[in-house]
Image (cartoon, rainbow, N blue to C red):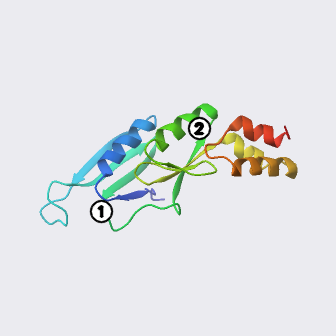
Amino acid sequence: MPQITPNLWFDTQSEEAAEFYVSVFPNSKITNVSYYGEAGPRPAGTVLTVVFVLDGQEFTAINGGPEFTFDEAVSFLINCADQEEVDYYWDKLSEGGEESQCGWLKDKYGLSWQVVPAAMEVLFADPDPARADRAMKAMLGMRKLDVAALQAAADGA
C-alpha cells in the first residue's frame, strides 16, 4: 500500500513552520528542502517544499502562495497519554495562535490541532450513558481539556 503523506500549503512559511513543528514533537526532523528554479512561478532559490517527520509521520509543506489557507475542516489530533502531555502540546501549539473549544486550537500558522487525553475516549465510551453524558457536557465547556475535571464530571462530583 502506498504511504499517505499530508501536504500542508503555506504562503511563504513552510520552512519556518516545519522547524517549529519538529521543535515541538519528539523524534522529529526535517529530511529535505527543495527550492524553486528558474521556471518559477516563485523567484529562483525560494523554498518550494519541506519534507519533515513528526514522530514517524511524514509531512510535506509547500510554499504555494496565498490562494489557499487552512480551516477547521482538516485538523490533526494528538492523542495524549495524560494531563502533562495535554498541557505541553496545548501550550506549545497555541502560543501565537488561537484557542478554541473542546481541545481544539489553531497554531500561529493557522493549522488546526485537537489536543486530546486518552482518558476522554474511555469516558465517552463508558457503558453508563449518564457518565458519558456528564463527561461530554463538561468537555463542551472547556478550551484546553482537563482530565481531572472530565473524570470528576463523569463521576458526578
The residue positioned 65% from the left and 42% from the top of the image is: 145
Q: Secondary structure at mark 1?
A: loop
Q: In which quadrant will I find the C terminus? A: top right
Q: Residue 140 location in percent, x, y?
A: 70, 52
Say what amino acid the circle numbered 1 marks: Gly
Question: Which amino acid, by three-letter code, is at mark 2?
Answer: Val
Q: Residues within 10 Å of mark 2 (few under 14, many from 20)?
A: many
Residue at the (45%, 59%) spot, across then down:
2
Where residue 92 appears, as percent x and y from the top left, is: 47, 38
Question: In the shown orientation, is residue 48 left or right of residue 144?
Answer: left
Q: Is residue 139 above or below residue 152?
A: below
Q: Is residue 155 above or below residue 13?
A: above
- State how far apart marks 2 and 1 are (Cα): 32 Å
Return the residue nearer the eye: 107 or 40.
107
Closer to the chain start, of discs 2 and 1, is: 1
What's the mark number on residue 64?
1
Above or below — where is 151 with respect to 77?
Answer: above
- Tell me, for residue 86, which label it has, or none: 2
